[in-house]
Amino acid sequence: MKVDIFMTEDTNNIDENNLYLWGGDFVQGDPKNCVAVALLNTEYTPSESIALYGSLKTENIGIEKIVANIISNPFIRYLILCGDDIRGHRSGKSLIALHKNGIDENHRIINAPGAIPYIENIGEDSINRFQKQIEIIDLLYEKDHTIIDKVVNEYSNKNPGSFGKPFIAIRLQPQQTKSIDDKRALHSKIIISYMGKIKVR
Amino acid sequence: MFSFTKEQKTFKIGDITFGGQPGKYPTVLFGGLFFKGKPDINKGRDHLTEMYTISEKTAVPGVPDFFIKKEEYIEPIIKLISQTVPDNLPFSVDFTDPAVKIQTLRTLSDHGLLDRTIYNSIHVGLTPEEHEALTRFTPSTAILVAFNPKDTSPDGKIEVLENGAHLLDKGLLDIALETRIQNILVDSAALAPGQNSGAAITALPVIKEVYGLPTGCAIHNVVEKSTWLESFPDERRIIDIASNVNIPVFGGDFAIFGPIEHAHTLFPLIAWQDILVSEYTESYFGISPSDSHPRRMFQK
């Protein structure tokens, strides 16, 4: 298991090449704005003047992407959750639980209500940084877009400044234990003959 | 197209056979109902009739996959099942809410339907309450979803089946065994684009060769979750449907294909694909298609 965290040197300038490296379903706005919005089951679209907004679907890989992307931009200091939480997955409440409680020794988000709330691909350093860098504003189940807009504007205007250096969470990779030398192999566990007969390697 | 060295387990629920060597039995297609909004029971009934009609015309078996979002939907949906799903065919029930899962199992038991129930699904989020309910009201069949949030590769999927990947204290296969679920289907857990989505397809032949169990997935989920495809609204539907062809090509046994409304396009497509697989696997591996295979029907 490789655990590796990088910090870049510059604290106040944005290096766009190192922003939001984990990808995902989001729209970038002003990178020096202090607000990001996570959307759950909602038609609401925030202003593109904020730093970032995008959808949150799953209580594991989805949350990991939000954490990793947000800590890559130290200017983001507020994460606003809005929309209806996702039935079964409970991704919104699970994200709030991660921010409040962290993870246990099995990497499960402590007291998360989601079905599979495991953080497996980023380290605890990244979670600690996320907890310190941002404040979560819980607007789950708020239907009134005017109220949401008002809160987004209110926090955008706070402008507390950069938290410090960007924090780049490197994806934890399971170690490759087998090498594949068969050109026809689909996977290290099986061998495929030229006619398509499969057997266990 | 493939054939497996490992003996392939098959089982029947009513008239539908699951599993086996590629080319032997047709791919089983699970069509989803009631995934969005409040269940429209009358519309659901019409969609079921349409799916069974196209299933009969193409010789590709269809299984309705009923999504039950809330407890208040359990009774009307189970009433629809009792009235509309023929006694010789299975159905699956799909849910995310733990309380709904438990209440649905109890209600299916009360209606004497557990022997035709495919429980969709058991995964690493299994709660002690759900485990207990599965032990008390045991469906004949369950789909085990090999989703491993830590390792999305085929190895990670096998880890979840084998030992629970430290997320459970035992593997999903052992859990199914101890709850005395008779029949197991393995879902290779298709994820969103950018999350190693192709691993769900590669895992099909890997899981079948390692365990010999009927294996499939909901590969259409990858298309459904693609935001990039929003630029192609007209093509999106056909890409969603066409993605299912990957499953028989890679030796898989079933496809959970999403909206049942896609049945009239997908069933002929899969019939055609099953014929193509069968022609090769009979020619090179001596696997004769079953009497109910689409190839028999189209040769009449």
Image (spheres, rainbow, N blue to C red):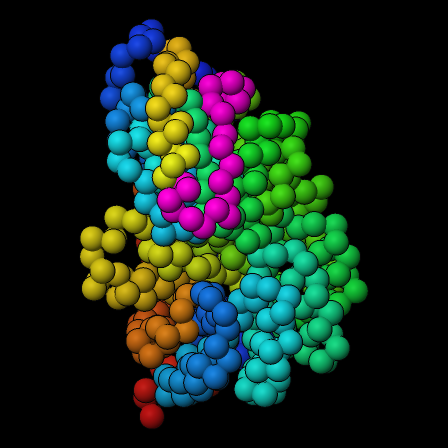
**Residue A145 covered by magenta stretch:** yes
Return the x and y of residue B286 as percentages of the image width and height.
Answer: 42, 72
Q: For this view, does A110 lie left or right of residue B200?
A: right
- Quadrant where the C terminus of chain B lies? bottom left
Return the x and y of residue A10 as percentages of the image width and height.
Answer: 31, 8
Q: What residue do we see at 43% from left, 26% from top?
A: A78
**Residue A196 covered by magenta stretch:** no
Return the x and y of residue A185 as percentages of the image width and height.
Answer: 37, 45
The relative height of residue B222 versus residue B142 in the rendered view (above or below) is above
Is residue A57 in view from this perspective?
A: no
The residue furthest bottom is: B300
Q: What residue do we see at 26% from left, 27% from top?
A: A30
Q: In which quarter of the image is residue B51?
A: bottom left
The relative height of residue B77 versus residue A164 in the rendered view (above or below) is below
User: Camera-side residue: B153 or B71?
Assistant: B71
Q: What residue do we see at 42% from left, 42% from top?
A: A147
User: Camera-side residue: A101 or B218?
Assistant: A101
The relative height of residue B88 versus residue B103 in the rendered view (above or below) is below
Q: What residue do we see at 26% from left, 61% from top?
A: B236
The relative height of residue A83 versus residue B93 in the rendered view (above or below) is above
User: Camera-side residue: A18 or A159?
Assistant: A159
Q: Quadrant of residue B283?
A: bottom left
Is residue A114 in view from this perspective?
A: yes
- Quadrant where the N terminus of chain B lies? bottom left
Return the x and y of residue A190 as percentages of the image width and height.
Answer: 46, 47
Total numbered circles: 0
Query: From which residue to which does the magenta span run?
Result: A128-148
